[in-house]
Amino acid sequence: MKKLLFIIVLFVFVCPVFVYAEELIPNASSGILIEANTGKIFFEKDKDKEVSIASMTKMVAQILIFEALDEGRIKLDDIVTVSRNAADMGGSQIYISEGEQISVEDLIKGISIASGNDATVAMAEYISGSEEKFVKKMNDKVHELGLKHTSFKNCTGLDEEGHYSSAYDMAMIARYLITNYPDVLKYSSIYEDYLREGTEDKFWLVNTNKLIRFYEGADGLKTGHTDDAGYCLAATAVRNDIRIIGIVLGENDSKVRNKETMELLDYGFSNIRKKILKKKGSVVKKIKIDKADNEIVQIALKNDLSVILDSSNDFDKYDYDIELYDYKLPIKKNEIIGRIKAFNNSSVVSDAELVVLEDVNKISFSKLFIKTLIDMIVGVY
């Protein structure tokens, strides 16, 4: 009897606890789990349901902010003068005051770490002149991304009729943000920081997303909470070179939200794996380029060509198609010259860019003359 009891206890404490997909996020109104690189969906629950999403709205504001930085329209060290409108915003705040001057980078920290409504409106006004114009740009952006279940009335996510999104749209927005502007993760992964250091108004920022402290690999992305939205979270984490994004909406309690989000991510890391089909730097084709100093040029993978699989499948046969772009000499080493696609059952499952492995220059007139002469002698012509 003691031996049997020992075996039962050992089984309970040593064996892993498996969570089935249908048991995930039971208390959420909706949610989704995707692999970030491909956007492939591995779990969904009412993914297109239109609901309030609170401060997760700010992910689109972040897209526009980092887009402006990328285009050089603003800089991190730009100084923003805070308006009364921004300073008077309710909800989560970093407590900036009217007339205060604060850097763009500090406002980004205020948005990414503390989810400051005042910081978001200050940046909206700085970029577009008014929150209304900025919100129009936010709606234009989601339409540009082809998202059909999102509409914004403000840039902060405060409850307002006609302001909503869906789990799927939020996942695509999160994916677009971290794929195009990965610097956002430098800020969203900070657990605590300070504003106005060295002054009597020093302000402590603590990240509203506790997963970045307690969940392995978590480095973002955005929390949300209002009366209408409940507790929401867009979480992203990376392990073994696999990044996943989990969206959980409409929870009644922040601790339950965090617990269920971590279970969702656990499910992803337990079931999603990457299979490398061809490694970075692998030569996939050799081409002949006329009038080049090195006539035979090797074309190779810029990055790994890989597929994302779940535990239920393991394709073993792939077909490949190589597309080469139009090019003009000279071609620089590592210049992108084409793309390779991997197919399984006629469906594209992965693709990667192709580069040349060495500089390719025009052949000099003297070398071209000698080559032509040799070709004539050996009977090429």
Image (cartoon, rainbow, N blue to C red):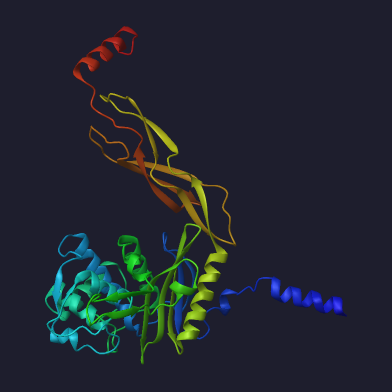
Question: Is the residue 163 above or below the residue 127 in the image?
Answer: below
> Could you tell me residue 312's position as x and y percent?
60, 62
Residue at 50%, 68% (x, y): give it: 216
- In the rendered image, residue 331, in percent from the top left (x then y), is placed at 26, 35
Residue farthest along the right direction in this orientation: 1
Which quadrant of the view contains residue 11? bottom right
Picture quarter with the C terminus: top left
Above-or-below relation of 16 to 307: below
Residue 129 picture quarter = bottom left
Q: Nearer the viewer, residue 18 or 74?
A: 74
Of the pair 153 and 325, the residue shown nearer to us: 153
Please give the name of the residue rendered at 26% of the width and 10% of the height, measured from the top-left corner: 373
> Residue 201 at what x, y percent from top left?
23, 82
User: Can residue 51 be seen in the rendering of this structure?
Assistant: no
> Where does the N terminus fall, quadrant-wise?
bottom right
Relative image position of residue 351 (x, y in whole percent) = 41, 50
Residue at point 58%, 55% (across, down): 314
Residue lying at the far bottom of the rendered structure: 227
| Residue occupying the point 48% across, 77% down | 261
Q: Is residue 12 left or right of residue 135?
A: right
